[in-house]
């Protein structure tokens, strides 16, 4: 072993270890990432030295990092065949707890070859081993010809011993003698799990070995090489992919590779809709792939996963400083070697550079979507139902994104066709104008009414939130040649609020909010006043609802007898109250009664019968039925009301048989 040198580590070590254990690395399994990436760093350095002619690598040299567990000995070992260290380098980088040997290395060689980013912080990264180990040993041999191997060991990371070692072959071997609380890290499945989490795409091949399984391997498992035609035992494969798809140029990748990568990384059985391959070298280095998954259903957890990497080393999921909040709905990987990480690589410094990265990612997504709208609208429409929640959320959260996307927002209409708002307003205005030409009388008053009506309606966007409940209104709109858009997702309400706030010429109104006003006929309203007053008095009395709003309208479709309308303002207030009242618990249905109106069609025979026979005793049953029929098409009846409705329906049918 030669002379043994003993000593204490840097005076800051006693202060730094509590930080390492409790703050710097909040996830204890992260030490595996640090030690493996340090091994990758050492190999990256050696490759670069070979590239600039300062190291002559043997032709058959294969670079690798080995991770070995030994459950019997309670050890975990990391071996690389990289640059290695001399005794002086161990003193500098280990004993003095230098932040990183990488910075000085890059400074020395930056002009001699194209810059390869060096991952590591060989210093604090190494000391993360003491989170789980009582004792750590290092055996290293420098690549420099004539170097002596060095052995280093330390218990608790305070005192150390250094001596001449016996390692053969350049590189470094680090052995962790696990503490009692960390024996899990000598377990094959636990270590493989961590390797999969952090090291799946590190740039050097990583091999895992279970020392106990290797010792216990039965002789029968060895293939008899003398037998001709039989293959030798299957070669052990690395646990990682050193050449991930995002590192390739988009032109080198095909659809099947993108889909397979998506399945492998996100374990999602549903194929992504499409993806964006980011590939940027200036003004910063960023690569990645963002996938658009199917997210249209209300029952899916609308939250994706954006995995952040630094030189193919996994950092964390969904770091909000780098990934714009609305992009969290997507799934993907972002690799940015230029990210300003702290010494543990676990957190980001929130600065202007990171904001530029975030803005770039947002811009590339908007460019992809607007480009698809312009050059491939067929597929854009095909994907719309799935991607619209994401786009609308992005417009609400990011003004720059909204500015780019505002002209390519589309809506599905009653004919299941997709239109922009200008297309909807133009089409709807045209249909109303044509209808007026057919029915309006040739008088100055009629022309003024038409112009006034046209001015109001052209900026009104009618919408549907439930195609079943609102089917009666939908049919009436279709019969009148009018259109509406379908807005069934919970993001739609805040989205249309935002659209209205930014465009005072547009007003959204649910299809059942003012259907009478939208579809009314040509009868003079003064002629309806007498009928309305009488029917309002009758319905309030029969239904025992003193504050019930009743409105008699001349609606073109005579088959429609009654309907309930709720003013847009009242309904939006209702929705907001429910949102902030735990799903509406405790809300009084009559709280917003003033906004709810029973509309009776003066053209309907049943309504006419009630008016003409309002003094007859049996008219009450028809009044109650008209109200319930209107309410059913508006919202579900309460259990008690439904029971009465069914009984009353049976009674009416029974009367028809007499």
Image (tube, grey):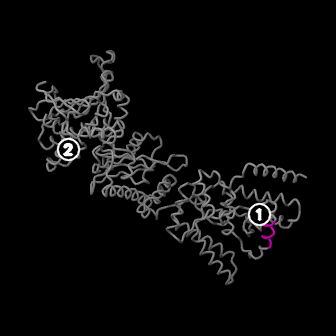
Residue 560 as seen in the image, left or right of residue 571: right
The residue lying furthest to the right in this view is 658
Looking at the image, can residue 20 be seen?
Answer: yes
Location of residue 448 by image quarter: bottom right
**Which x, y percent locates residue 3?**
11, 26
Q: Quadrant of the N terminus?
A: top left
Task: Give whichever of 141, 373 is nearer the camera.
Answer: 141
Camera-nearest residue between 204 and 156: 156
User: Residue visible at 77% across and 74% down?
Assistant: 529
- The residue beneath circle 1 is 546
| 25 in magenta | no
* Disc 2: which residue: 102
Left or right: where does residue 224 sit relative to residue 540? left
What segment is highlighted magenta in the picture? Answer: 530-537
User: Image point 59% across, 75% down: which residue?
Assistant: 455
The Cα atoms of the two marked residues, 2 and 1, are separated by: 82 Å
**Residue under the point 35% across and 40% down:** 26
User: Quick check: 130 left or right of 524?
Assistant: left
> Picture quarter containing residue 399?
bottom left
Locate residue 31 relative to residue 60 in the image: left or right: right
Q: Nearer the viewer, mark 2 or mark 1?
A: 1
Quarter of the image where one finds residue 156 = top left
């Amino acid at each position: 072993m030669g002379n043994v040198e003993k000593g204490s580590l840097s005076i800051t070590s006693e202060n730094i270890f509590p930080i390492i254990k409790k703050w710097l690395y909040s996830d204890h399994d992260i030490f595996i990432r640090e030690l493996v990436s340090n091994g990758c760093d050492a190999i990256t350095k050696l490759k670069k030295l070979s590239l600039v002619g300062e190291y002559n690598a043997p032709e058959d040299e294969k670079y690798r990092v080995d991770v070995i567990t030994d459950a019997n000995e309670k050890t975990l070992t990391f071996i690389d065949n990289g640059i290695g260290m001399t005794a002086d380098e161990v003193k500098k980088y280990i004993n003095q707890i230098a932040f990183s040997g990488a910075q000085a290395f890059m400074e020395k060689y930056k002009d001699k070859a194209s810059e390869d980013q060096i991952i590591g912080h060989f210093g604090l990264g190494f000391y993360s081993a003491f989170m789980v180990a009582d004792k750590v040993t290092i055996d290293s041999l420098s690549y420099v010809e004539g170097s002596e191997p060095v052995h280093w060991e330390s218990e608790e990371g305070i005192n150390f011993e250094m001596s001449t070692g016996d390692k053969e072959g350049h590189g470094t071997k680090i052995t962790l003698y696990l503490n009692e609380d960390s024996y899990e890290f000598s377990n094959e499945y636990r270590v493989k799990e961590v390797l999969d989490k952090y090291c799946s795409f590190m740039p050097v091949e990583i091999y895992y070995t279970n020392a106990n399984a290797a010792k216990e391997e039965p002789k029968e498992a060895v293939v008899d090489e003398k037998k001709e035609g039989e293959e030798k035992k299957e070669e052990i494969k690395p646990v990682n992919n050193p050449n991930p798809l995002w590192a390739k140029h988009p032109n080198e990748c095909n659809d099947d590779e993108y889909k397979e990568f998506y399945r492998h990384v996100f374990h999602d059985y549903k194929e992504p809709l499409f993806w964006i391959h980011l590939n940027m070298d200036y003004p910063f280095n960023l690569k990645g792939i963002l996938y658009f998954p199917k997210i249209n259903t209300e029952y899916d957890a609308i939250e994706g996963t954006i995995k952040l990497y630094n030189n193919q080393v996994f950092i964390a999921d969904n770091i909000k400083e780098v990934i714009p909040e609305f992009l969290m709905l997507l799934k993907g990987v972002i690799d940015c070697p230029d990210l300003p990480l702290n010494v543990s690589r676990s957190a980001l410094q929130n600065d202007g550079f990171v904001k530029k990265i975030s803005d770039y990612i947002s811009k590339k997504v908007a460019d992809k979507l607007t480009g698809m709208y312009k050059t491939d609208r067929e597929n854009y429409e095909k994907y719309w139902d799935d991607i619209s929640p994401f786009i609308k959320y992005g417009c609400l959260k990011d003004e720059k994104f909204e500015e780019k996307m505002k002209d390519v927002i589309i809506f599905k209409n009653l004919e299941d066709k997709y239109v922009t708002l200008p297309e909807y307003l133009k089409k709807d205005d045209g249909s109303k104008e044509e209808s007026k030409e057919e029915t309006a009388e040739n008088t100055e008053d009629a022309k003024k009414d038409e112009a006034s009506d046209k001015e109001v309606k052209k900026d009104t966007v009618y919408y549907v939130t439930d195609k079943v409940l609102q089917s009666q209104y939908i049919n009436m709109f279709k019969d009148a040649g009018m259109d509406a858009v379908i807005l069934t997702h919970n993001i739609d309400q805040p989205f249309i609020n935002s659209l209205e706030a930014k465009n005072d010429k547009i007003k959204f109104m649910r299809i059942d909010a003012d259907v009478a006003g939208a579809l009314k006929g040509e009868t003079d309203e003064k002629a309806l006043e007498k009928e309305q007053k009488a029917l309002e008095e009758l319905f309030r009395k029969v239904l025992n609802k003193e504050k019930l709003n009743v409105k008699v309208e001349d609606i073109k479709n005579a088959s429609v007898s009654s309907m309930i309308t709720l003013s847009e303002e009242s309904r939006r207030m209702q929705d907001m109250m429910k949102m902030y009242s735990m799903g509406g618990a405790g809300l009084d249905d009559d709280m917003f009664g003033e906004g709810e109106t029973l509309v009776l069609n003066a053209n309907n025979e049943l309504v006419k019968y009630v008016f003409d026979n309002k003094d007859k005793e049996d008219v009450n049953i028809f009044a109650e039925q008209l109200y319930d029929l209107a309410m059913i098409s508006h919202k579900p009846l309460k259990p008690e009301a439904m029971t009465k409705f069914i009984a009353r329906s049976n009674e009416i049918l029974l009367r028809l048989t007499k």
